[in-house]
Image: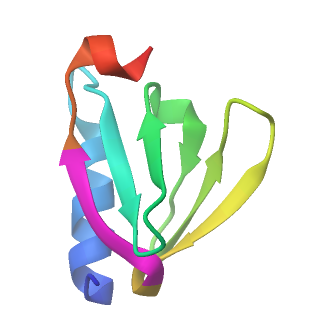
Amino acid sequence: MMAPTQFEEAMRAHLKREPFRPFAIDMDTGERWVISQPDEVVHGAGPTAVYFAPDRSIHFVGWDNVRQLSDIEPAAAV
């Protein structure tokens, strides 16, 4: 599990990269959400974010449920 500031810093860093590079949010439940475009996640200041999944479902992402954010290969994001 990530600390609140770790989550906040990692999310900000991944979303603000130029050019954007796909990344994954690995949840403590074993789920892995692949973020292939920056508009798939909304993150303001704070230890939470909102993920808009390809199936149109909405997921609240809290720092206390995230194991890690990790880079992925662009081909895996499709």
Place of residue 3 in the rendered image (x, y in percent of width and height, measured from the top left): 26, 88
Question: Against 36, is 59 above or below?
Answer: below
Q: Where, by quadrant of the figure, is residue 77 drawn?
A: top left
Q: Where, by quadrant of the figure, is residue 26 drawn?
A: bottom left
* Residue 55 falls left or right of residue 37: right
Place of residue 29 in the rendered image (x, y in percent of width and height, measured from the top left): 48, 72
From where the camera sits, is residue 46 visible?
A: no
Question: Against 47, is 31 above or below?
Answer: above
Nearest the viewer among 12 and 60 is: 60
Q: Quadrant of the N terminus?
A: bottom left
At x 76%, y 53%, the residue is: 58
* Residue 56 falls left or right of residue 30: right
- Image label count: 0
At x 40%, y 75%, the residue is: 28
Place of residue 71 in the rendered image (x, y in percent of width and height, measured from the top left): 18, 39
Nearest the viewer among 49 and 78 is: 78
The answer to if 42 sits in the magenta stretch is no
Q: Which residues are magenta?
A: 65-70
Query: Secondary structure of the magenta portion, mostly?
Result: strand
Q: Where, by quadrant of the figure, is residue 20 drawn?
A: top left
> In the current view of this chain or complex, which residue is farthest to the right?
56
At x 68%, y 60%, the residue is: 59
At x 45%, y 14%, the residue is: 78
Nearest the viewer among 7 and 25 is: 25
* Residue 39 falls left or right of residue 78: right
From where the camera sits, is residue 30 visible?
A: yes
